[in-house]
Image (tube, rainbow, N blue to C red):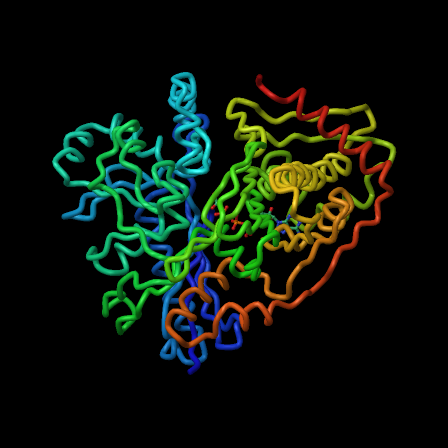
Amino acid sequence: MAGCVLAIDQGTTSSRAIVFGDDYQPLSVGQQEFPQHFPKSGWVEHSPTDIWTSTLRVCREAMEKAPSGGADVAAIGITNQRETTLIWDRSTGEPVYNAIVWQDRRTSDFCAQLRADGLEDKFTSKTGLLLDPYFSGTKIAWILDNVDGVRARADRGELVFGTVDTWLIWQLTGGTVHVTDATNAARTLIYNIHKNAWDAELCSLLKIPLNMLPDVKDSADEFGVTEADLFGRSIPILGVAGDQQAATVGQACFKPGMVKSTYGTGCFALMNTGDAPVRSNNRMLTTIAYRLNGKTTYALEGSIFVAGAAVQWLRDGLGIIESAGDTQGLAEQADANQDIFLVPAFVGLGAPHWDADARGAMFGLTRNTGPKEIARAVLQSVGYQTSDLIDAMQADWPDAEKPVLRVDGGMTASDWTMQFLADILGAPVDRPTVAETTALGSAWLAGSKAGVWPGAESFSAQWKLEKRFEPRLDEAERRRLLSGWQDAVRRTRST
Ligand SMILES: Nc1ncnc2c1ncn2[C@@H]1O[C@H](COP(=O)(O)OP(=O)(O)O)[C@@H](O)[C@H]1O
Ligand SMILES: O=P(O)(O)OC[C@H](O)CO
């Protein structure tokens, strides 16, 4: 049986929809950016309406552009920016507040208070996460405690919570289905990843009523069918995964020890650790990579908040490039005798430091430092940060050999960055032919569930290398650069 799959990739800065053919190739794409709202320093919000209307629009666009006009789309897969938090009325569907985005730091003090109360170990042992504003739990609590009348409505059972996947499924099904998948639930700080269930004790600590929470399904499962008038017929939604987990699937990292790293706004590296969750001693996250047929596969994750966003800063903040691709030429011409280190802690530092109050810094500046050296430092910061993650993962899981890194995301278009990454890791970096691995991962979840695409083994065999970057930096030089980076991070930390 063959058929096409519509993948929805609802990201932080844009919504995208791609129709994949039965040879896993993209046939058509729709994409739309939407506004970011920064109501206060450190706050980041999206309009729930923008999330939904941009998604609907790009789905229609991709379907219309597909050769069959979308007639042979057999299923929908959804992948999404994770942790971003929405609450809405279960009768009217009306949101009570904007979506609070994963990057938002407003609950930093609340997290510090929970840590001071000695609760971090309880949260970490059950959820695999840390007490950082990044995750949904404290964002839910903030809305309940700070938006007028919301606590009382929640207590009366009138409100529901969802991550972006849940919100989209609610909309696509005409407000009839309130569900999520295990990978998205695993990012909320209230989901027990060992028991695969919402955790009543953690909900009670954060004062979150259990009746607000969606049902949690496998990543390939029945998530409802779309309302007939949206696309001219009902289409089943059969795959859902958070975007970094979907990229892990799309990169066919199905075996323990395999690692993918995605370079978009931020950078997220996930290492498949098989059916046993590995507790990190190095402040990595333990998370659910995917849950298929009731069987959970776990991953260690390192999350970096700023990767491509630093390139955007060069363009929009400093104005020293016109487009992201300009960084390559600048980095190639930069003065080899200047060691400039940029620590892009624009919204604090993520793994392995989790320092919400740190802010960006640059070291080693001289009168000769100019745009070329700064651009190179931006691209290098992505390599250095990844190196910190891979080192931490290997320390947590020493059995794993130094991995080959499978990379994807917009920033992997930069050969210079990928070569530096291989050099500083001292390990090969593999870039696949299909750039849209996140969308492909969610399409495979849906297509395999629909029975129109084959299973994991056959899907793995289609993964094709576009280019391998081999490490070629002298070991002594590698160590010298890493030591300079670590010193720069030390000086940037807030504590
Ligand atoms: N040639 C390039 N060199 C360096 N950075 C790039 C290049 N092309 C894109 N980027 C960066 O990649 C990011 C976009 O990647 P994408 O995967 O679309 O991100 P997201 O899904 O997070 O919105 C942007 O931050 C952009 O600055
Ligand atoms: O939307 P992206 O691609 O920047 O990904 C965001 C992550 O899911 C946040 O955890």
Front-lying residue, 169 or 354:
354
Q: In which quarter of the view is residue 303 placed?
A: top right
Q: In which quarter of the view is residue 132 placed?
A: top left
* Residue furthest to the bottom: 1
Residue at point 61%, 52% (across, down): 257
Q: Is residue 178 visible?
A: yes
The quadrant in which the C terminus is found is top right
Q: Position of residue 433 (x, y in %)?
A: 64, 66
- The total of numbered circles placed on residues is 0
Q: Is residue 48 left or right of residue 425?
A: left
Q: In which quarter of the view is residue 466 placed?
A: bottom right
Compared to residue 82, the image places residue 19 above or below, namely below
Compared to residue 120, the image places residue 479 above or below, namely below
Compared to residue 16, the image places residue 327 above or below, namely above
* Residue furthest to the left: 156
Q: Position of residue 449 (x, y in %)?
A: 38, 69
Front-lying residue, 479 or 84:
479
Q: Position of residue 54 (x, y in %)?
A: 37, 55
Q: Is residue 444 left or right of residue 422?
A: left
Residue at point 27%, 35% (across, down): 200
Q: Is residue 60 left or right of residue 301?
A: left
Q: Is residue 311 visible?
A: no
The quadrant in which the N terminus is found is bottom left
Residue at point 39%, 29% (across, down): 122
Front-lying residue, 469 or 334:
469
Residue at point 61%, 67% (across, down): 463
Q: Position of residue 268 (x, y in %)?
A: 56, 45
Front-lying residue, 127 or 448:
127
